[in-house]
Image (cartoon, rainbow, N blue to C red):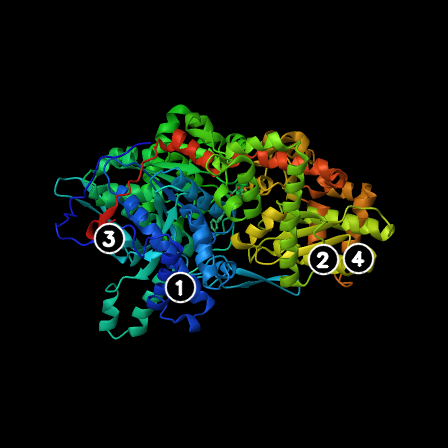
């Protein structure tokens, strides 16, 4: 831990008579009495309400401000570090941050949950109902965005100075409704009732250019230079959200950018009377950050998406340059103060933008700028699917970013010169390494740009990194082996245990103390209690209580009665063919079919729970949702089943909802085709909360199984090499269908319209795809999966065995903390140290003003 020397920025001379803010005042005091007074004060002065007419939302907002006040001293003290010339700062660049609700999390980090609960209780109100008011900012699609949020939590908790940079989408990921069994998308209006956790900082706005053309000229020193004459200029306005570390003084900043029109830009249109034309420009500018693309794989040809990416990247880099220059240093040392992580290729245009800013705007030589750029960036890849690698058609790219196109050509030119020496005459290799895909329509390959422009490249699980080196990034691995490393994902125990599972948290605290919250490895100590019958009983009681909560929630929201003593078998994640929710459905139909054949079949009662959104344009994924809801409608209402199996599709799976789901699981479904899921992080959240996993050897499942022990993990299915092998030998799913009578019967039931009221067309596209193509090998893995599920059921019959396996899972999952992952990034990629944020008893008000 470093303590940096006192640093008073030159611009903030503090006069003697400057007013001061006391630490123990109504805005910071922590007694129940002070909290209640502050709450009433905010209700009156910020919401403008008396208690008797306040809505639940008013009460929530006022309470949120009470909590935010208590973070501000620490927040501003941390922010001052960003200008400190000796501070080294991590910038996490991500098009998505899927944060989840803040109130509960901040209370935990501040350590004032009990006081605030008491204050609310003394006012005769329901604390949990107030918490439920919070709209989560759904500024992400799934895994990648949620990972960014976990990493922000860990950075702050480890006291690493960091800034998250991203986009403040006005509408986040859509809300999902289920109507007649189909997904219906509803706009997510997360800002409509006000959002207390952000502060606009218009004083740090920047301008971002688009379109137009470039001009070359010779400067006064006779140097060749290029200037960009843009067609459009928009303004980026930063909105800051505090990210508080757990029980530390560090409060980092998540700085999200909103696009607005530059007031004066199209003033000429007004002069010629084209009022609508001028306003139209304004509307276009504001469209940039209007909505999150709800796809979790690249979509072709969407110019607005490219412009979103460039917009936030340009804002972020301009902001970093401003901070660097403020600290009094020159841009040749930019990479010494900042390290920037590219969360996939979505921010990869950064490489060209930093070059432009350094060379065109700040006059650095190309070679110097390139060295700074390469030493600044590191790139995390999150996918193995070749079709999910981002690429942009050249002309589309050039229309929005003509100067960047030139810069990318120049980078590529120099890069090709360098590899030509190494791979003399190997034209194919050169073509694969090139930043430009020239086979047919020409594209810019963003992963190639990220690899060339970064000093470090990583995958997100051991298997994923290994396969990256062998497949999609093979040529880059051969060229730069030293750049590659693995950083297995992790999740934050603060949100995923302490906040979402208070019962387990209490049991853990009572049994092994609280150290595990910051040092998750300490969960190991639980192993000493696995043989203790009363501890096991307690463990089981807790799981049952949580399942009862979920049972009640399902009943109150959907009117479906499930049995809390049944095995809760849960699959929640984005809907994708490679994630194979439909394999899970084939198993459900298998059990249903067996019950129909033998009404007295002795089976372990199960509740199958699904949740997840489908990309709105992903036809097959939407039909998988319809299949699940249709099977649910039949199975849940067939008296022959006698409630032994129930199927529930929980609508609108998001962070808030997931927090009641993970803790309630007995069985976690991680059943993707081996080699397709980069890591998975839900798998970690389930197992940490004591669920057992049924899974393939894919993504981080491999490491989870190693950690918890193969005897505590239900493994099935082909391995990644076997998948490749099977395909190479000409996989024919029809053979599996025709040769496996039970599988055949299951598929025939779907085909016959048993789940679609006789409609044989509804699921035909799904079934045909399986029987004739089956690109994700469901039929090849079917028998192995069904057999494995039988082992699950047999194990569940012996509750003592199951409980011991459950405890062992939690005990051995410490490695999957995002604290461990972030520590590895700090040590092996970023080279950053924690910095103590000092809390002075009094802070002069105007010294706090500038960040
Ligand atoms: C790109 C261009 C245009 C439109 C959309 C996109 C886009 C958006 C989101 C592409 C991909 C994503 C998200 C990917 C993602 O979430 N990947 C997951 O990342 C997790 C964290 O590393 C892994 O655990 C998952 O295995 C991986 O699927």
The local crowd at label 3, few if under 14, some if 14 to 19, many if 20 or more residues have their Cα within 10 Å, is some
Label 2, label 3: how far apart the Cα atoms are: 59 Å
Give the numbered dot on residue 752.
4
Identify the mark nearer the N-term, 4 or 3: 3
| Above or below for 417 versus 539 | above
Give the numbered dot on residue 228.
none
- Give the number of the mark in front: 1 or 4: 1
Between residues 4 and 301, which one lies in front from this camera angle? Answer: 4
- Give the number of the mark in front: 2 or 1: 1
Where residue 185 appears, x then y in whole percent? 55, 62
Identify the mark nearer the N-term, 3 or 1: 3
Give the numbered dot on residue 194.
1
Marks 1 and 4: CB-CB under 8 Å? no
Is disc 3's CB within 8 Å of ligand 1? no
Is disc 2's CB within 8 Å of ligand 1? no
The local crowd at label 2, few if under 14, some if 14 to 19, many if 20 or more residues have their Cα within 10 Å, is many
Identify the mark nearer the N-term, 2 or 3: 3
Label 3, label 1: how far apart the Cα atoms are: 27 Å
- Give the number of the mark in front: 4 or 2: 2
């Amino acid at each position: 831990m470093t303590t940096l020397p006192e640093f008073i920025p030159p611009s903030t001379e503090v006069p003697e008579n400057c007013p001061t803010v006391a630490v123990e005042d109504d805005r910071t005091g922590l007694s129940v009495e002070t909290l209640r007074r502050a709450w009433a004060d905010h209700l009156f002065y910020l919401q403008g309400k008396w208690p008797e007419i306040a809505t639940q939302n008013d009460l929530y907002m006022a309470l949120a401000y009470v909590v935010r006040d208590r973070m501000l001293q620490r927040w501003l003290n941390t922010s001052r570090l960003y200008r400190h010339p000796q501070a080294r700062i991590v910038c996490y660049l991500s098009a998505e941050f899927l944060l989840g609700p803040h109130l509960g999390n901040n209370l935990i980090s501040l350590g004032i949950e009990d006081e605030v609960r008491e204050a609310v209780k003394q006012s005769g109100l329901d604390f949990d109902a107030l918490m439920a008011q919070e709209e989560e900012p759904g500024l992400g699609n799934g895994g990648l965005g949620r990972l960014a949020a976990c990493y922000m939590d860990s950075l702050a908790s480890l006291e690493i100075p960091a800034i998250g940079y991203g986009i403040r989408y006005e509408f986040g990921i859509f809300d999902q409704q289920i109507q007649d069994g189909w997904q219906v998308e509803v706009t997510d209006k997360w800002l409509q009732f006000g959002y207390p956790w952000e502060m606009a900082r218009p004083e740090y706005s920047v301008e971002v250019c688009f379109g137009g053309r470039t001009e070359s000229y010779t400067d006064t020193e006779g140097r060749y230079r290029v200037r960009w004459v843009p067609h459009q200029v928009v303004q980026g306005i930063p909105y800051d959200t505090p990210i508080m570390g757990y029980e530390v003084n560090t409060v980092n900043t998540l700085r999200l950018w909103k696009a607005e029109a530059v007031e004066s830009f199209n003033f000429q249109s007004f002069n010629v009377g084209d009022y609508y034309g001028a306003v139209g420009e304004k509307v276009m500018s504001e469209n940039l950050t209007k909505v999150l693309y709800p796809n979790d794989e690249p979509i072709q040809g969407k110019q607005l998406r490219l412009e979103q990416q460039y917009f936030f990247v340009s804002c972020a880099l301009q902001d970093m340059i401003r901070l660097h220059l403020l600290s009094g240093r020159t841009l040749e040392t930019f990479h010494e103060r900042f390290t920037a992580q590219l969360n996939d290729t979505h921010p990869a245009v950064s490489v060209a933008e930093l070059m432009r800013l350094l060379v065109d705007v700040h006059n650095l030589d190309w070679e110097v700028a390139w060295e700074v750029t390469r030493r600044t960036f590191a790139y995390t890849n999150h996918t193995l699917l070749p079709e999910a690698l981002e690429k942009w058609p050249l002309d589309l790219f050039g229309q929005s970013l003509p100067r960047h196109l030139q810069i990318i050509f120049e980078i590529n030119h120099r890069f090709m010169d360098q590899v030509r020496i190494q791979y003399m005459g190997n034209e194919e290799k050169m073509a694969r390494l090139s930043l430009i895909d020239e086979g047919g329509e020409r594209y810019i390959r963003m992963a190639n740009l990220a690899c060339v422009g970064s000093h470090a490249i990583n995958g997100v699980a051991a298997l994923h990194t290994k396969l990256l080196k062998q497949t999609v990034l093979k040529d880059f691995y051969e060229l730069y082996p030293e750049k590659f490393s693995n950083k297995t994902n992790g999740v934050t125990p603060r949100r995923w245990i302490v906040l979402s599972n208070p019962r387990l948290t209490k049991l853990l605290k009572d049994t092994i103390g609280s150290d595990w919250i910051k040092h998750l490895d300490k969960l190991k100590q639980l192993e000493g209690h696995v043989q203790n019958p009363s501890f096991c009983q307690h463990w089981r009681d807790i799981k049952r209580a949580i399942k009862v909560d979920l049972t009640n929630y399902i009943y109150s929201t959907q009117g479906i009665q499930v049995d809390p003593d049944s095995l809760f078998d849960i699959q929640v994640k984005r809907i994708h063919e490679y994630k194979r929710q439909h394999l899970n459905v084939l198993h459900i139909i298998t059990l249903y079919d067996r019950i129909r054949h033998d009404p007295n079949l002795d089976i372990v009662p199960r509740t199958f729970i699904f949740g997840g959104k489908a990309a709105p344009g992903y036809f097959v994924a939407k039909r998988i949702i319809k299949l699940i809801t249709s099977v649910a409608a039949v199975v849940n209402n067939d008296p022959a089943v006698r409630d032994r199996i129930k199927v529930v599709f929980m609508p609108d799976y998001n962070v808030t909802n997931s927090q009641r789901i993970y803790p309630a699981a007995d069985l976690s479904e991680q059943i993707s085709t081996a080699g397709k899921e980069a890591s998975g992080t839900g798998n970690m959240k389930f197992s940490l909360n004591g669920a057992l996993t049924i899974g393939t050897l894919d993504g981080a499942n491999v490491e989870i199984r190693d950690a918890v022990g193969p005897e505590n993990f239900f493994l099935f299915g082909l391995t990644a090499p076997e998948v490749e092998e099977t395909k190479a030998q000409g996989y024919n799913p029809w053979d599996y269908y025709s040769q496996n009578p039970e599988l055949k019967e299951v598929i025939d039931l779907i085909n016959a319209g048993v789940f679609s009221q006789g409609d044989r067309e509804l699921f035909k596209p799904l079934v045909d795809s399986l029987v004739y193509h089956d690109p994700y090998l469901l039929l090849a893995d079917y028998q192995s999966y069904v057999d494995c599920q039988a082992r699950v059921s047999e194990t569940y019959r012996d509750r003592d065995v199951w409980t011991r396996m459950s405890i062992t899972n939690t005990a051995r999952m410490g490695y999957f903390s995002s604290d461990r992952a972030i520590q590895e990034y700090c040590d092996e990629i970023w080279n950053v140290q924690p910095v103590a944020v000092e809390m002075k008893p009094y802070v002069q008000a105007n010294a706090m003003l500038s960040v």
